[in-house]
Image: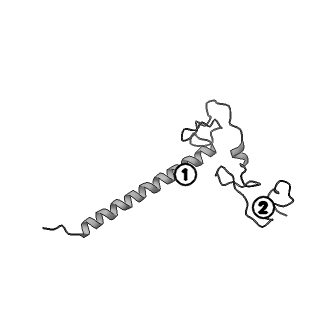
């Protein structure tokens, strides 16, 4: 007995049919019934605009209920991805600067 929902119009889920469980088209990583679908959390309609509603992220207005850090779950995931990308870029720049400084120190200056 499988715990996953069957594909629309089928008796089995995607995993039981020999595939992998599809994930939310929004990129949150939650499982969905079929490819290209949104999970229940991402598919929920935006809350009415009121204090405590998510302001959005990257210039996109949201309006869903705030869950943590002043953002809804969807915008929080996007913000965390942006932060991870920025951290990775900073680390690459730092590593390149260190390598350049070490290369300059290894080569003696001509007299």
Crowding at label 2, few (<14), some or many (≥20) Cα neighbours within 10 Å?
many
The percent position of residue 101, horizontal first and vertical second, equals: 29, 62
Sequence-first tag of 1 and 2 = 2
Q: Quadrant of residue 57?
A: top right
Which residue is depicted at the point 54% across and 38% down?
A: 59
Q: Front-most of 73 and 60?
A: 60
- Circle 1 SS class: helix
Q: Front-most of 10 and 42?
A: 10
Q: Which mark is residue 14?
A: 2
1 vs 2, front mark = 2
Query: Residue tagged by mark 1?
Result: 81
The percent position of residue 7, horizontal first and vertical second, equals: 81, 56
Q: How is the image coloured?
A: one colour
If the image is split into quadrants, where does the C terminus sit?
bottom left
- Circle 2 SS class: loop
Q: Is residue 27 toward the left or the right of residue 34 in the image?
A: left
Is 48 rendered above or below residue 21? above
Is 91 rendered above or below residue 59? below
Q: Is residue 90 toward the left or the right of residue 18 in the image?
A: left
If the image is split into quadrants, where does the N terminus sit?
bottom right
């Amino acid at each position: 007995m499988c715990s996953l929902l069957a594909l629309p119009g089928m008796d089995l889920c995607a995993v039981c049919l020999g595939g992998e469980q599809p994930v939310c088209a929004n990129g949150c990583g939650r499982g969905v019934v079929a490819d290209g679908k949104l999970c229940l959390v991402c598919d929920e309609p935006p809350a009415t605009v009121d204090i405590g509603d998510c302001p959005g992220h990257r210039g996109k207005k949201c309006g869903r209920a705030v869950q943590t850090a002043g953002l809804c779950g969807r915008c929080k995931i996007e913000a965390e991805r942006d932060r991870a990308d920025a951290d990775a870029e900073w680390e690459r720049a730092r590593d390149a600067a260190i390598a350049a400084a070490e290369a300059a120190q290894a080569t003696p200056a001509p007299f």
